[in-house]
Image (cartoon, grey):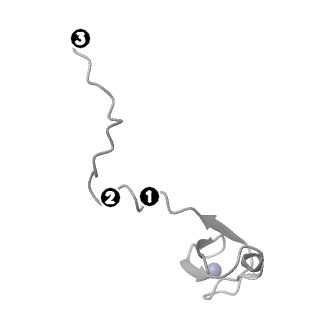
Amino acid sequence: MPQYEFECLCCSYRFTVLTSWREREKVRCPRCKNGELKQVWSVFSARSKGSTGGGCRPAAKAG
Ligand SMILES: [Zn+2]
């Protein structure tokens, strides 16, 4: 089952939920029970682990 990360729009609480794609609409904030959540796509977690040889580094231009 996929894992989704949400951020509550009410209290800014972040949490992850193991649920299906459809069931994710029923997810509520475990802290304040608010149903308005913003889904957080975990794009940031891939960045801070150090470079793994991407090779698409922009070339430094002199001048
Ligand atoms: Zn909340």
- Position of the C terminus, as image quadrant, is top left
Image point 62% across, 88% down: which residue?
30
List the residue tagged with mark 1.
44
Cα separation between marks 2 and 1: 7 Å
Q: Amino acid at mark 2?
A: Ser
Image point 37% across, 55% down: which residue?
47
Q: Amino acid at mark 1?
A: Phe
CB atoms at circles 2 and 1 under 8 Å apart? yes
| Res 24 → quadrant | bottom right
In the image shown, does 1 or 32 lie closer to the viewer? 1
Q: Position of residue 26 (x, y in %)?
A: 77, 81
CB atoms at circles 3 and 1 under 8 Å apart? no
Q: Is residue 8 above or below residue 48?
A: below
Residue 63's label in the rendered image is: 3
| Res 4 → quadrant | bottom right
Residue 26 is left or right of residue 17, and the answer is right
Q: Position of residue 23 (x, y in %)?
A: 75, 80
Instruction: Identify the secondary structure beneath mark 2.
Output: loop
Cα separation between marks 3 and 1: 32 Å
Q: Is residue 19 above or below residue 52?
A: below
Q: Within the displayed image, which quadrant is ligand 1 positioned in?
A: bottom right
List the residue tagged with mark 2.
48
Image point 28% across, 46% down: which residue?
53
Q: Residue furthest top?
A: 63
How many other residues sit within 10 Å of disc 2, few (<14), some (14-19) or many (≥20)?
Answer: few
Q: Is residue 51 above or below residue 15?
A: above
Cα separation between marks 2 and 3: 30 Å
